[in-house]
Amino acid sequence: MIIRSKAPLRIGLAGGGTDVAPYSDIYGGAILNATISMYAYATIHPRNDNKIVINSIDKGTRLEFTSSEYLEIDGKLDLLKGIYNRVVKDFVKKPLSFELSTFVDAPPGSGLGSSSTLVVTVLGAFTEWLKLPLGEYDIARLSYEIERVDLCMAGGKQDQYAATFGGVNFMEFYENDKVIVNPLRIKNEYLNELSYTLILYNTETSRLSSTIIESQTKNVLNKNMSSIEATHRLKEQAIMMKEAILTGNFDKIGEILDFGWENKKRLATGISNTEIDEIYSTAIKSGATGGKISGAGGGGFMIFYCPNNSRSKVIKSLKKFGGQSKRFEFTTQGMVSWKI
């Protein structure tokens, strides 16, 4: 028997940063995101030889252990070990024997939620294998707890829910880690137009998102009003973007993205830098009307809204920076798992 699963990565369209505590606990957050045709994959081969093998194919790392109820968190594939530890602790209460193989279409630090999507994918495979009593909200919440609580990795809440539910979602965040996912019913022609006019540009740089998020968190705790007011504006941006996409008001999308980018840069140091600013200004001069960093900032993927057939011109203008523009489609399905 082979157990497989996959979950989609996402792009944040508006409201990014408002899902991060303590802001979301104090003021409430709102985000609009959409899953795309890039994925995290997981395969479990059950074994009966008292061994655990963890194989990250994209990282080229393979670890082997004697089966036990706890795998040491030591900086080597900790996400995968953390999932196993929690599954054993909360559900099976005994060591398991298996080989787990994973692959992600985007590297860590891409800004597409790759790490959280991987957690959702692997947890989905374990749920399929062991018939764990977990629904969509349960998988997303447990994935969040594994990353943020068990492994103490700084970050927000949107990625786990986007990967689990899939599609275009308006998400609301409240105190005590409460999350409400509101799927948006968007006309197919609107989604097709949005995927045609949006460029997903990989800067070919990575960043440690936790450093930026920790700085953002400190700004809220220290009552940095400039940062807090900028986060309020980002929450407003999520509502503006929701209305624009639902009604097909595409003339406003670039403007809304630009409004969000100007406020995003005020959340914390390191969100932008000289190179990112130059990439952004070049895209605008070439016909884009707005854009943003996907994720916490500092590197990874950027998106640009390119109306009036300006897409090709913008892509050409960005080539000098050494990055790549990647085609994508929006997806409607979240994490799925199956057995062979």
Image: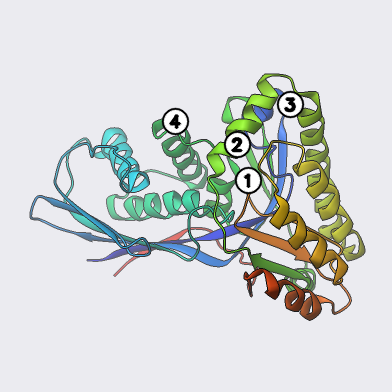
Q: Earlier in the sequence, mark 4 or mark 2?
A: 4
Label 3 sits on residue: 27
Q: Residue at x 69, y 73 (%)?
A: 320
Q: Earlier in the sequence, mark 1 or mark 3?
A: 3
Cα–Cα span, label 1 and label 2 = 7 Å
Q: Which quadrant, please, contains the C terminus? A: bottom left
For marks 1 and 4, give the one nearer the viewer: 1
Please, what is the three-letter code of the amino acid marked with disc 1?
Ala
* Residue 275 x/y as whole percent: 70, 57
Cα–Cα span, label 1 and label 4 = 19 Å
Q: Earlier in the sequence, mark 2 or mark 3?
A: 3
> Considering the numbered disc 2 on the image, is that residue within a helix, a strand or a loop?
helix
- Measured along the vertical axis of the image, is residue 237 above or below residue 2? above
Examine the image and state in which quarter residue 239 appears. Answer: top right
For marks 1 and 3, give the one nearer the viewer: 1
Label 2 sits on residue: 213
Q: Is residue 186 visible?
A: no
Q: Residue at x 45, y 42 (%)?
A: 143
Please, what is the three-letter code of the amino acid marked with disc 2?
Ile
- Circles 1 and 4, Cβ within 8 Å, touching? The answer is no
Label 1 sits on residue: 296
Cα–Cα span, label 2 and label 3 = 17 Å
Please, what is the three-letter code of the amino acid marked with disc 3?
Tyr
225 on left or right of 219: right
Mark 3 neighbour class, 10 Å CA radius: few under 14, some 14 to 19, many 20 or more: some
Q: Which mark is residue 71?
A: none
* Residue 110 x/y as whole percent: 56, 56
Q: Is residue 335 visible?
A: yes
Mark 1 neighbour class, 10 Å CA radius: few under 14, some 14 to 19, many 20 or more: many
Label 4 sits on residue: 149
Q: Earlier in the sequence, mark 1 or mark 4?
A: 4
